[in-house]
Amino acid sequence: MSPYLGEPRDLYHGRALCVLKPRTARDVGDILALCNETGAPVTPQGGNTGLVGGQTPDASGDSVVLSLERLNQIRAVDAAADAMTVEAGVTLAQAQDAAQAADRFFPLSLASEGSCTIGGNLATNAGGVHVIAYGSMRDLALGIEVALADGRLLSTLGALRKDNTGYDLTQLFIGSEGTLGVITAATLKLFPRPRSRAVAFLGLRNPAEALQLLNFVKGHAGPMLNAFEVMSRPGLDLVLRHIPGTRDPLAQAHDWYALVELAAFAEGEAERAAAEILAAALHAGLAQDATLAQSLDQASALWKLRESMSEAQKREGGSIKHDVAVPVNEIPRFIEEAGQRLRAAFPQARPVPFGHMGDGNIHYNVSQPVGGDKADFLAHWTEINAIVHGVVSELGGSISAEHGIGRLKRDLLRQTKSPVALDAMRAIKATLDPNGILNPGVLL
């Protein structure tokens, strides 16, 4: 049972009565019906890659861990309808491969895609690097199948694109973190497969220049803009130091960097557009240097710099993480203000912000001081949270852009969500799960 009782950050370790691994949606419903009768708490779990403890049982040992890993069938792929129906335990990488086999594209892309599952992606409304072009999982789901707390199965599966017949029950369960029902399958949107792709890495002076560059690229690339990621030099240094096979792609060091990806449906179109846009951006002084990948291997190497950021910070030592969002135009102000306040309170701490600038989601992580004690640093988690989230709140942002609330941010939610919103959420929870068996202690 051990692999099911902890989570990637080692922040939460629980106990459980047992781990159950059903094979069908009906099995899931039967398990929930029995747990509902007996009052046994249920902790749903997908690939166990969540970062806020939402998939980890508590320490009581009273709960059942319900693993969806054996619900792993691709039920249908319909290229003509641009849709596929998959079970909750299918990994994101398997879903991507199934789409590609039908000459289609499923755009959700995460660093954990080899192990995270579609059910977990839906339960947490996963985002990733392509939100700027395709949206989050809320935008990528046409319908779901979900087991309710009393064991009944509710299905909105199907390739229907428009259905204006009452409440949107599909969206109600997406992002609910297993507290309203257990998602067992989903119908996902597919898209035409891009025929060309261009990846560029640019050196910048500061986040304000990154914002200017983002707007410039959006204006010139239009719907071809697939991703726009930013990272700081300290973050890149951690990757170069800790991740084998990485190298600095530019001749000189810069304070900030942007990774830009364009995709198009005609052969060579993205590459031609990227070359023109980069030349124009450099000429306009919106970037100090740039390199454009000339092969798939080079493109993968550039993406590895970005996708290894979290792993590099973990190897560096203690890291206090923040998955936040602010309006895109406020990102430079957020980074500057949060940095100033952190330096004033903790002069030796090292901010390592990076992430999805295109949609306003910045992972504002803070690494421990050089040579410092990890435990002593992590003891300041609450204080550093308060500083970063205080700036987020002032700018009208969110304390969780894509990781969810889980156990980690449950108390923060009470401080940042309006009482009316919390009352509405509790009312929905009480209606669908009156006995409170579904993921107790998570979210609410």
Image (cartoon, grey):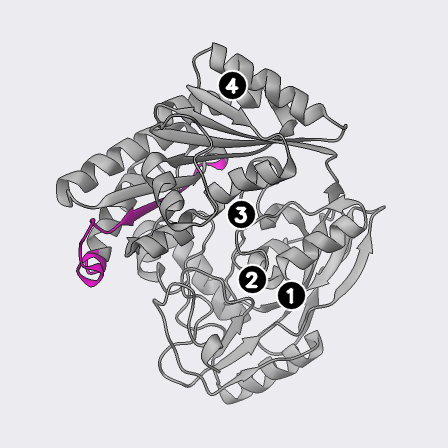
**How many C-alpha atoms fall within 10 Å of the one at disc 4: few (<14), some, or many (≥20)?**
some
* Mark 4 residue element: helix
User: What amino acid is labelled 1 in the image?
Assistant: Ala
Q: Residue at x 45, y 80 (%)?
A: 2
Residue 334 is left or right of residue 263, and the answer is: left
The residue wearing badge 1 is: 88
* Mark 1 residue element: loop
Q: Residue at x 83, y 48 (%)?
A: 79
- Residues at marks 4 and 2 touching, judged by CB atoms closer than 8 Å: no
> In front: 326, or 288?
288
* Mark 3 residue element: loop
Q: Position of residue 80 (x, y in %)?
A: 85, 46
Distance from the alpha carbon under mark 4 to that under mark 2: 35 Å
- Residues at marks 1 and 2 touching, judged by CB atoms closer than 8 Å: yes
Indicate whether 273 appears above or below 414: above
**How many C-alpha atoms fall within 10 Å of the one at disc 2: few (<14), some, or many (≥20)?**
many
Distance from the alpha carbon under mark 2 to that under mark 3: 12 Å
Q: Residue at x 64, y 28 (%)?
A: 224
Distance from the alpha carbon under mark 3 to that under mark 4: 23 Å
Q: Mark 4 vs mark 1: which is more N-terminal?
A: 1
Q: Position of residue 205 (x, y in %)?
A: 35, 23
Q: Mark 4 vs mark 2: which is more N-terminal?
A: 2
> In front: 305, or 48?
305
Give the number of the disc on residue 216. 4
The residue wearing badge 2 is: 120
User: What amino acid is labelled 2 in the image?
Assistant: Gly
The residue wearing badge 3 is: 127
Residue positioned most to the top: 283
